[in-house]
Image: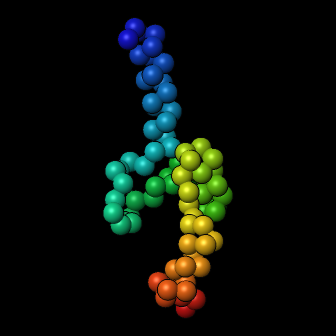
Amino acid sequence: MNASSRSWLTRALEHACHFLPAQAPLEVFVHHNTLHAFEHVPFHEALVSAQEKLGAKGYLSTKRYLEAFRSGRIDVG
């Protein structure tokens, strides 16, 4: 890889790092805000932005929520 390619790659990675969480994925949620790059907007807007930029999904499908509700895994109270 030549110096120009390395420079381009370095800039691209520095830009991408702004959108990536500062820790590895965890099995369960802890204190770290994985949407830290989107803290300047309301939560639901942050999820939409993250989905557009990162391809991540912030919500389950309606079908999955209904399945969880019907099975008792989630409830209204």
Q: Is residue 1 above or below residue 49?
A: above
Q: Give percent across and percent down for residue 25.
A: 36, 54
Residue plotted at (43% across, 49% down): 21
- Count of residue discs: 0
Residue plotted at (49% across, 40% down): 18
Q: Depth check: give the residue in front, 55 or 33.
A: 55
Q: Give percent across and percent down for residue 70.
A: 55, 86
- The C terminus is located in which quarter? bottom right
Residue plotted at (56% across, 57% down): 57
Q: Give percent across and percent down for residue 11.
A: 48, 24
- Please indicate, yes or no, whether residue 33 appears anywhere in the rendered image: yes
Q: Is residue 15 above or below residue 42?
A: above
Q: Give percent across and percent down for residue 6.
A: 41, 16
User: What kind of colouring is applied to the model shown?
Assistant: rainbow
Q: Is residue 52 above or below residue 33?
A: above
Residue plotted at (50% across, 43% down): 19
- Please indicate, yes or no, whether residue 39 appears anywhere in the rendered image: no
Would you say 38 lies left or right of 18 here? Answer: right
- The N terminus is located in which quarter? top left
Q: Quadrant of residue 26?
A: bottom left
Q: Depth check: give the residue in front, 47 or 67.
A: 67
